[in-house]
Image (cartoon, coloured by chain):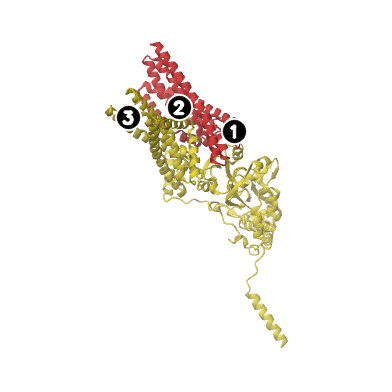
Chain colours: A yellow, B red
Amino acid sequence: MALRHVLYVVFLWLVAVAGLPAHAETPDAALAKLIDEARAAAAVPGACEQPGHDRLVRIFCDGKIRVGVREYYPLFGTREGQVRSGYDVDVARALAKHLGVETVFTRVNAASRIPLLADDKIDLTIATMGHNTQRDGQVRFIRPHYYRSETIIVGPKGLTIRDWPDIASRTICVTIGNGSNAQIVSHNARLMLFDEAGVLPDKLRDETCVLAAQDDSFFDYYFTEPGFAQAYDKKFGFAQLPWGMAVALTGSDRLARALDLTSQIFHRDGVFLDVAARNRIGLGFLESQRALWNRPDCNTDTGNADPACVLPALSAALQPTPFAAQVTAFETWLEKNTGIALQLPMFKTVPAWQLFKAGIVNSLILVAGALVATLLFAMVLGALQSSRSLLLRWPARALALLLQSSPVVLTLVMSAAVALALFPYSSAVAIGAAIVALGLMNGANAGQAIAEAMQTLRTERGGPPAPTVELFGRAVSRSATQIVSFLVNAAKGTPIASFIGAPELLSALTDITSFASGRITTYSMLLVFYVVVVIVVVWLCDRLRVWLERRQMVAA
Amino acid sequence: MSRISSDFVPQLLAGMVVNFQIAAIALLIGLAVGGLLALAKLSGGVGGAIATALIGLMRAAPTFVVMFFLLNIIPSDATLLGVPVAPSGIMTVALSLVPYAAAYVADNGSEALRQLRDGSPLGALLFLPNVTRAFFVLVMSSSAGAAIGVPEGIAVILREAELMPTLGDKMVLFAIGIFCFGITLQAGFALMRVLQRHLGRLALRAR
């Protein structure tokens, strides 16, 4: 009876155990198994001479792993003589040590780090490479990611900038092609473009730039300099980008799996964190990853494929326009038939196309607004300066003198400063401020011309008669040439509105070229657009001048 | 006022020297290009027609757009026969002012040449005050360089203004800027008027 009872319990236990899900393997065990298999494959006599091995096996055949690293990226990959240092370099060494092989370093840069993998010149690249969906088609990224950067805004410590609303209408120095430029633009900041990131700290120091945006990994090095760290600080960060080690897409399946597991273990055990601390780079991301990879649900051999544990690749592709293919076909056709390499980025992606359309519309509004404002201010200031009352005449003259003495950029900035003190920043406010500034500057001069014409008319009439509407009309007609010249000047001056963040065409195209190619075509189109606009304005103003002069002749 | 840094005024004056440099370079190149265009315009024929069209285009080209055009189409590592030719920021601003300067010189130069041909050397000499006026207009226009990081006078003011917390503080700075540039401009125009009066007196004596 007792035996039957025992057997029954054992049976129930066996049934229960069989019904339980299989225990997940630890990443350590999975990695050890993978390495053992690869070592065994490499140890078979003559096997290493056979082609077609996975790179993991070949690494054990050669006893070394070929790693592509950067040589001029401070704190991440640098070389002085034969001495290499930096976070990426130390990560490569730690990985090789874990696999029990030696490292052979090869210099790579942003352009060569992917082709060298595809050409089988290196087995692995650890070279500050951001993981985006576009690159997923070119290389196999190792997950979890070994680091994460973000774009940070850096500026003088005394300047209070906390978040996006604080940068509206400010100028931010950036590098052309930086993926986060589009995001900065969308928050109404102006961009000052530079070809290379290396100049940004100098531009901050010589005060050419008040704010600069670049990867935190780039600024980390400069913040190790006491002088720089004392004068500048990080305002805020955005556009987080996971960095991935990468192997070739083909022939690297087992190597990639081994590195996935190693990366997972390095996060869990704080190896990445220690290496980062030694190299004085930011630790925030690695600290959070350490906690994550110690979680039981992530610390399994399948954790590196679990979306709850690994970060997604950044989606870098901009939505194409419905006619992007035709535009590309046209560019290709033109280059093939004429040799002209035309690039039309403003027609290819939805954000660029929207910026372009808005830029044209805003430019035309700005031109029309500047012309109307110039005429209006000319009439008002002309009438005030012609007044017999000293209280009206002298303030108007003083204002005209003040406006004539102020450089155009300064008047524009003053107008914007007043507008922003009254209203929260918006594109409409910037355009309005620009229209007022351009109207005042040119209207003051045209108004002075009207007042001078009024003076001559009074003199011709042998004394100072009271200003009448009829006399004022004749003064306007007499000063037609001057008025027209300042109207044309106002139209020509409209592109400068981009300086205060008005989203006209120059501003829009600068934004487009900050994240797309085709600068030469873009700026050539811009020049043609404005020259045509000014020519049309000259023609229209000429019609106005003829009408005013005829009116004067009739009146005479 | 106490918030303004102690080295602001020296920096502003140094920046204004840059404005004068830019204006001088633009005017010199403008005189050369505009002079040739004036001669071509007066010669008539196809050359004259081309010169007239070119002057019209130059007159219509907005300085600010030309500046960004030059900045973006000339590579920073451009060379000519092995010599680096990429213009500096100052040179870029100066070159962007050349279309205006050249068109102005061509217009006034052709008028002066016409006066000279008509036997009025003093009428032709009016070209001098007109060029003086253009120079001071160029000084004021060179403030556009602030947009591309050229350390001219307005850039110095705007840099300082970024650190000012209130609109009132900023306005004080702007007033200093207007005073400095205004004095320069008005002095220039006064010089031009003196020159015009002097030439007028010479004309009367010649009669």
On the picture, is A151 further left or further right than A272?
Answer: left
Note whether residue B92 is visible: no
The kind of residue on which mark 1 rests is Phe
The kind of residue on which mark 3 rests is Leu
Of the 4 image quadrants, the one containing the C terminus of chain A is top left
The local secondary structure at tag 2 comes to helix
Residue for point 35% across, 33% down: A541
Instruction: Judge the density around disc 2: few (<14), some (14-19), many (≥20) Cα neighbours within 10 Å.
Output: many
The chain identifier of the residue carrying mark 3 reads A
Q: Quadrant of residue B85?
A: top right
Q: Are marks 2 and 3 on the same chain?
A: no
In this view, A14 is above or below B65: below
Q: Nearer the viewer, mark 2 or mark 1?
A: 1
Closest to the observer, A232 or B59: A232
- Mark on residue B101? 2
Q: Earlier in the sequence, mark 2 or mark 1?
A: 1
Q: Nearer the viewer, mark 2 or mark 3?
A: 3
- The answer to the question of whether label 2 and label 1 lie on touching residues, with beta carbons closer than 8 A, is no
- The residue that mark 1 highlights is B8
